[in-house]
Image (spheres, rainbow, N blue to C red):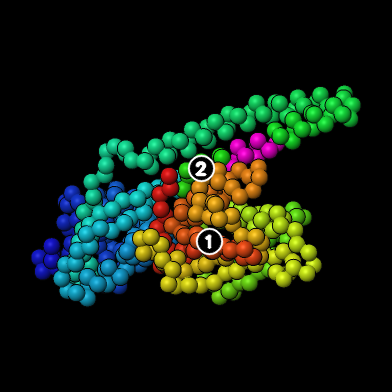
Amino acid sequence: MTGAFLPADPGAVLAALPAPVATFDAKGRWSGLNEAAELWLNLSERGVTGLSADDPALIARLRVEPELGPLIAQAAQAGESVLHPRVRFEISDRAGRWTARRAGLDLAPLPDGGVVALIRPEPEAEVDASPRRAARSAIGMAEMLAHEIKNPLAGIRGAAQLLSEGLGPEDRELTDLIVAESRRIVALLEEVERFGDTTLPQLRPVNIHDILDRARRSMALGGTAPRIVADYDPSLPPALVDPGRIMQVVLNLLRNASEALAREPRGPDDPRGPPLIRLRTAYDRDVRGPEGTPLALQVEVEDNGPGIPEAIADQIFEPFVSGRENGTGLGLALVGKIVTEHGGLIRVDSRPGRTLFRVSLPLAGKGAAPWTEPY
């Protein structure tokens, strides 16, 4: 497929081709889609015509890795067909669900300075027999059980509260224990439900500092948090995240740090000073995800507590692994799951006197990373 054999007006033959084909004008803007491309990309020709290849308005509907704009520019400058054998497409539907697809991309220059792109979809597996499918089933079962168990627990709690009204102080202690333990179990079940949530994150450009400030205020309202110091980079561009889920990540990390500090009382002469959590943001253009996608936005949560116990240091993001008595072991597992759903990274550096969690996230715009399918 080369530009030399293409007609001056490729739109005349687009509709007749069974494979998905898209065209771009000399400025790299979408100029045409055939029917096969509209179906495969879940886009309409009318909706994309005139938009640049990597227009921010398309981020909510289509993400391509590697980025489409440079690929088009490369083909236009080369003057001959350029083949990219494995390109990743993240395609959204109207319900906000994303589908990951891979295809070869054959780009060739047109006589008018534009580019035509032939998409060669990879065959999709008919049966998913991988461990991922089994994990999804297990998570779905846990979520269903959590939902069903919460209903009778509400009845038990209500009955205990009614019984307590006619009891003396000693007997009321027993009903109060029933109520307290029922609430603790419900809180655990709600964590299981959050961990089992397989819906995709609703990504949009967000000022990360707004999320961090909300999390700080939420901790302060609880009345038990140590001092939290903010050290922000005010020049950071917006992140491409689901604000509700990243809020959950920050809250879980702050609570984890707060609980670690509370487990180790310290006197006024302690060389580490009073309990402290530092919340920091930074820009690091060298950080990339597993597939090479840029993750330049950094969020750090650091505390001067006892550090992570060595026995669980390499398992802290696994479900039901906890370093504290009566811990559920789901807080950090949920953090890892949400960060992975965003295509991000989370790392931890811990030693006695200092624990640092670093979350790396995609930026909105051309630096955005594709969503990674969770279990």
Dot 1 falls on a residue whose secondary structure is strand
Secondary structure mainly formed by the magenta segment: helix
- The image quarter containing residue 52 is bottom left
**Magenta stretch holds residue 19:** no
The x, y position of residue 356, in whole percent, is 58, 64
Q: Which residue is situated farthest in the right direction here?
A: 168
Dot 2 falls on a residue whose secondary structure is loop
The x, y position of residue 56, in whole percent, is 43, 64
Q: Residue at x 23, y 51 (%)?
A: 121
The x, y position of residue 46, in whole percent, is 33, 56
Q: Nearer the viewer, residue 173 or 297?
A: 173
Residue indicated by mark 2: 197
Please state the extent of the stretch shown in magenta in the rendering.
Answer: 183-191
Report the disc number at residue 81.
none
- The image quarter containing residue 308 is bottom right
Q: Nearer the viewer, residue 124 or 302?
A: 302
Numbered circles on residues, count: 2
Instruction: Tell me the kind of residue under disc 1.
Output: Val
Q: Is residue 134 left or right of residue 85?
A: right
User: Which quadrant does the N terminus fall into?
Assistant: bottom left
Q: Are marks 2 and 1 in contact (CB under 8 Å)?
A: no
Q: Is residue 176 visible?
A: yes
Report the disc number at residue 348.
1
